[in-house]
Amino acid sequence: MPRRRSYDQYCAAARALDAVGDRWTLLIVRELLAGPRRYTDLHADLPGVSTDMLAGRLKDMEGAELVTRRRLPPPASAYVYELTRRGRELLPVLRALAEWGAPALEEPRPTDAVRAHWFAIPLLSSLEGAAAGVVHVTLDEGDFHVRVGGDGQPPEYGDGAPSDTADVRLRTDSATCRALAAGEATLGQAVRDGRVRVEGDGHLAGELPARLALLPVN
């Protein structure tokens, strides 16, 4: 196991920070919550991280049993990193951090990178409790999807379009997503105002507009 610094405090919060408190670690978790990723894909979607830093963090995370590395079958034959069960349990932590940090988001700075799937986390709360299905979200910057489990199962998100057919599609833009994340509007209000378009003819497409009118994003 790689050598890591520790706070050496008999405290659950300190133990958690021993594992995920280093710079970049939780952002790597954010990327891997969207699905298994190759090293090159992780590096591309984490602007600013050096190759040495990323490799070191991934090695530490493997040692802490947060991620595993496996080889894809032919013809891909590439290695991917994916979260373990314990790593996936960090989703509520990311959701709480996103909610806490949303008021500071403001307008993008000239140096800010933007990826579509970074807007997935603020949308999850609005979809909890909805009927099971797949929601495909399209922004100018790209696509992501959310899988709603139904029966009280928490929704999960993935990068890009879903591999199967989506039950409903939401079309919007990053400015609207920023307003939603900051609590300046609900998703239902954005649908009514035309800032979010709902497309599809399945049960989930019929349910979402009425449901979203009642639920805030955060």
Image (cartoon, rainbow, N blue to C red):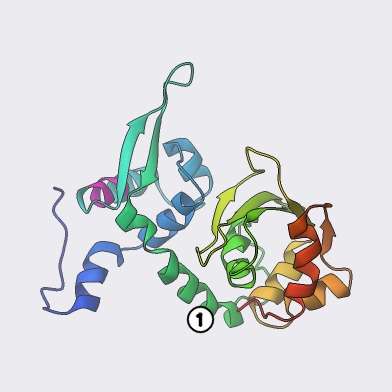
Indicate the quadrant where residue 93 lies: bottom left
Looking at the rendered structure, the number of numbered marks drawn on it comes to 1
The answer to whether residue 86 of the structure is visible from this angle is yes
Q: Residue at x 56, y 49 (%)?
A: 158
Amino acid under disc 1: Trp
Q: Is residue 202 left or right of residue 118?
A: right
Q: What percent of the width, then of the height, locates residue 97?
A: 46, 74
Q: Which residue is mark 1?
A: 100
**Which SS does the magenta portion mostly show?**
helix
Indicate the quadrant where residue 117 lies: bottom right
The answer to whether residue 107 of the structure is visible from this angle is no
Q: Observer-nearest residue: 188 or 139?
A: 188
Quarter that holds the C terminus: bottom right
Q: What percent of the width, then of the height, locates residue 105?
A: 61, 75
Q: Residue at x 20, y 77 (%)?
A: 12
Q: Observer-nearest residue: 77 or 58?
A: 77
* Above-or-below relation of 69 to 128: above
Q: Is residue 23 left or right of residue 132?
A: left
